[in-house]
Image (spheres, helix red, strand yellow):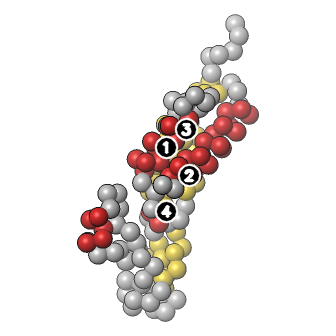
Amino acid sequence: MHEMSFAAGVLEKMLEFAFSHPDRRLVEVKLAVGVLTCIDPEQLAFCYEAIAAGTVVAGSTLTMEPVEAIVKCAGCGYHGSPKLWDDGLASALAFAAPATLCCPECGGTAEALQGHECAIRSVRYTTSSLAAP
């Protein structure tokens, strides 16, 4: 389950943010997650919530926006969406049909240009009311 390592990386960055901005309370972290990462969004959110519990960022949520895969073939010049595995394999997976790096046009090897991302896009926070009166 590599979702745990991604969640730990996000949590580390959010704890850095929280400690450098003690007057702010983290509400939401928005991630851009490429489909080629094979990350299950529900598992990632669960892992983040589990390891954030008991920290200063507990209660914050993880929101994900998918980043579609784009491939390019050096052989035929194709540029676009990758070929997906057949329905037999795709139906065995609960969250997505995995992409191949096989060119959908000529069958040659395609290079992934986009879709491996897992990046923090934005952070939403509120001003903390914990300051002494």
- Between marks 4 and 1, how big is the CA–CA gap? 16 Å
Along the horizontal axis of the image, is 58 left or right of 64? right
Q: Is residue 74 visible?
A: yes
User: Would you name the residue on which mark 4 appears?
Assistant: 37
In-front residue for pair 62/121: 62
- Between marks 3 and 4, how big is the CA–CA gap? 21 Å
What residue appears at the point 43 percent right and 48 percent down from the top-left corner? 43
Q: Position of residue 34 (x, y in %)?
A: 49, 61
First in residue order: circle 2 vs circle 3:
2
- Between marks 2 and 3, how big is the CA–CA gap? 11 Å
What residue appears at the point 39 percent right and 89 percent down from the top-left corner? 107
User: Would you name the residue on which mark 3 appears?
Assistant: 51
User: Would you name the residue on which mark 2 appears?
Assistant: 6
Q: Quarter-wise, where is residue 27 in the image? A: top right
What residue appears at the point 29 percent right and 64 percent down from the top-left corner? 92
**Disc 1, disc 3: CB below 8 Å?**
yes
First in residue order: circle 3 vs circle 4:
4
User: Would you name the residue on which mark 1 appears?
Assistant: 47
- SS for dot 3: helix
